[in-house]
Image: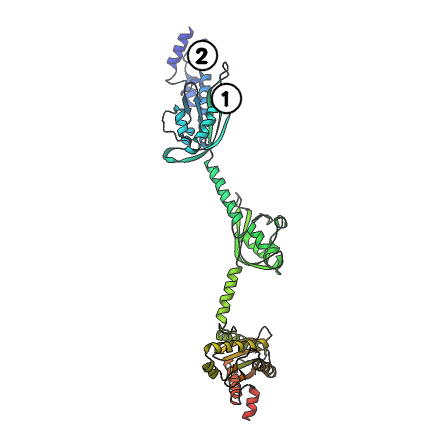
Amino acid sequence: MKSGAVMEEYRQAAPLGFLTYGVPPLFLSGAAANLVVGAPLSAVLLGGASVALYLIGAASLREVVGRERMTRNLVQAQQIGRLGCWEWNITGGELFWTDEADRIFGFRSFDMRGDIDLLLQAIHPDDRERFNESLRRTAATGESLDLLHRTIGRQGVVRYVHTRAEAIIDRRTLAPVAVTGAVHDISSRVHEVEKLRLHAAVFENTSEGILIMDRYGVIEAVNPAFLKMTGHTKRELLGGKPGALLEKGRGNESFYHPLWERVLREGCFRGEVATLRKDGTIVPTDLYVNTVLDWDGSPLRFVAIYTDITARKEYEENLKRLLVTDPLTGVANRRAYDEQMDEEWRRGIRHRTELCLLMIDIDHFKTFNDTFGHQEGDRCLRLVAQSIRSVVNRAGDLVARYGGEEFGVILPETSLAEGAAIAEKMREAVAHDPQGVAFERWNRQVTVSIGVAAVVPTMDYSPSFLIGRADIALYRAKSDGRNRVVTTEMTEHRQE
């Protein structure tokens, strides 16, 4: 049998499209293989030459199928890797490209071919001239092309790409005849880098102190705001742990370790802490610690953000001070007086200690105010309050403006005799104050009358009992001629 006849017989025996899509009977399996095996040998064997050609065809089919599989895998790999390929025939001017290159460049063509102008139109206008110059140089000299640029495709979609290309050299003329290139879509990477740059800019320029630790709590990075806040240098902080910075006098055992345990347990922490500066001063801070998780859910990093709340604390303290301070005289107001009186009364009951109260009234103040006017009257109140406060030295004592021209002084753990001695010093301080306001009409200093009372608080009485007794003593002092100190003991002797 001639080879041409054999090939014709082979074509007739093989199904349509056999070389591309069919499977030869000799390579069937299962039921199909049984059919072949059960057939007469003459039906299977077509002769020595025919069998040989059949085997050659089977081998060729395997090669074709393998190539098709490799082609599909290559296309899929290009899609996954966002990598497209193109080729420009310099002589004919034709441009060919793959599906992925079509997606990246956004070509408006459906036959996967065009010309070099189509490629140039897909390059972003701001990068087009630079790309064209590089491409022409490759086509003319064979120099490799390696370029980062942008493309602009359908509906104006801009992509960031990395293009590499090489010239194909004619072996006879040694001149470039084509340029083949690969374009890699790096848009997602560029956007990630932009995010990282933004995060880095925030990290470097934010006013909040940021501290980054590894999974073991060791400091890896700090930003300039944290260095400014604490007065430390990077060298002093990196590689250490932040426990000693959190709160002076508490140490790791009582504060830092519970905080760290809470972060490990709950993933975050938020609260106010007193951060210790390098110079030993304290910075009130709002601390927020968050956990960055690894791929398996375990802690990878810890980020601590410190916000300096000094200004807020000062505002809160000022607001608190305004709530309990008399704006005219600067001493405590009636609200603060009532609160401390109640508190000291309860403390006296618990500890069975004496509580002394002074009630002070400026003598002839109404006449003074009517004579010299309200401005001088206000000045008089301020100077008297200043003189009274100059005598009080203990932290627990309180000087308050009780109302009008009347002041009250609370003296915890003070006997009646001790209170009377303090009251006498106050009276003298007001009467001999070199800044005191004189009555021009009577040519005399401003003076005060003081009533003194002291009791050991009990559950049977309320603070009003002590206030009433001090008021009686004050009334007696004013009745006896003013500018004097009278105690409840003195009033009781008088009544007897």
Q: Locate residue 13: give its quadrant.
A: top left
Q: Position of residue 91 (x, y in %)?
A: 43, 18
Q: Which mark is residue 273?
A: none
Q: Is residue 44 above or below residue 456?
A: above
- Quick one: 367 or 158, which is closer to the camera? 367
Which residue: 47% across, 34% down? 186
Q: Locate residue 429: give its quadrant.
A: bottom right
The amino acid pointed to by label 1 is: Thr
- Quick one: 169 or 304, which is closer to the camera? 169
Q: Is residue 213 left or right of residue 140?
A: right
Q: Position of residue 77 (x, y in %)?
A: 46, 30
Say which element carries label 2: helix
Tag 2 residue: 53
Query: Would you say the residues marked 2 and 1 are in contact, meaning their CB atoms lie under 8 Å apart?
Result: no
Q: Is residue 60 above or below residue 428?
A: above
Q: Is the residue marked by circle 2 packed among few (<14), some (14-19), or many (20+) residues within 10 Å?
A: some
**N-terminal-most mark, 2 or 1:** 2
Cα–Cα span, label 2 and label 1: 48 Å
